[in-house]
Image (spheres, helix red, strand yellow):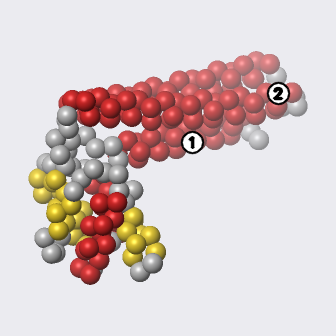
Amino acid sequence: MAKNEIIQKAEEKMQKAQNVLERDLGSIRAGRANASLLDKVSVDYYGAPTPLNQMASITIPEPRVLLVTPYDKSVLNDIEQAILMSDLGINPANDGSAIRLVVPQLTEETRKDLAKNVKAEGEKAKVAVRNIRRDAMDTLKKANKNGDYNDDEFHDLEKQTQDSTDKAIKVVDEIVANKEKEVLEG
């Protein structure tokens, strides 16, 4: 394995950890309508769990309203049930052709709880990044023992790995800070 391949793979994995964090934080509601709130909702469609966003168009006609318009009107009640069964805490209003979801205004206490959840998700992402760094360092140490690198090269690669980790952690912190601000401001 070439020197840079180890670091490059680690950086790719760190990027994936950041992407997962962004996706997970997208499903945390912040008092305003966001189509990603419904990303984790699956509807039983002809016996198969199907993601809601594949069965309906999701639009935001007003800042705190999501409008779910199914492509097949016969599944309207199934979609309504799936939303009710999800842990969104939003009651759907079925008007016969579409479902309206009014995102409730968040209380201060709820905002603080959501901010804690955001921080917890951020910590999970940081742990993932650190685990990736540890794995990369272990791989580098094995390669160094095998004589693939001299000590100077090994220390340079160690430093590059740490720099990549620091950058990834900084990005995670920025993502968390932005989401936390969004949640607390509403």
In the picture, measured across the screen, residue 183 lies left or right of residue 14, that is left
Residue at screen point 32% across, 32% down = 113
Classify mark 2: residues with Cα within 10 Å, few (<14), some (14-19) or many (20+). Answer: some
State which quarter of the image contains the N terminus: top right
Q: Secondary structure at mark 2?
A: helix
Residue 144 — which label? 2
Between 84 and 102, the one lying in front of the other is 84
State which quarter of the image contains the C terminus: top left
Residue named by callout 1: 12
Of the numbered discs 1 and 2, the one sitting upstream in the chain is 1
Quarter-of-image position of residue 98: bottom left
Between 114 and 131, the one lying in front of the other is 114
3D distance between C-alphas at marks 1 and 2 = 22 Å
Residue 147 — which label? none
Between 125 and 110, the one lying in front of the other is 110
Residue at screen point 29% across, 77% down = 75
Residue type at mark 2 is Asn
Measuring from the top left, give residue 42's x and y in whole percent.
Answer: 39, 64
Measuring from the top left, give residue 49's x and y in whole percent.
Answer: 44, 70
Residue at screen point 52% across, 44% down = 16
Q: Is residue 139 visible?
A: yes
Decide: is 105 above or below 150: below
Q: Is residue 71 visible?
A: no
Residue at screen point 41% across, 80% down = 46
Decide: is 25 above or below 86: above
Decide: is 102 above or below 82: above
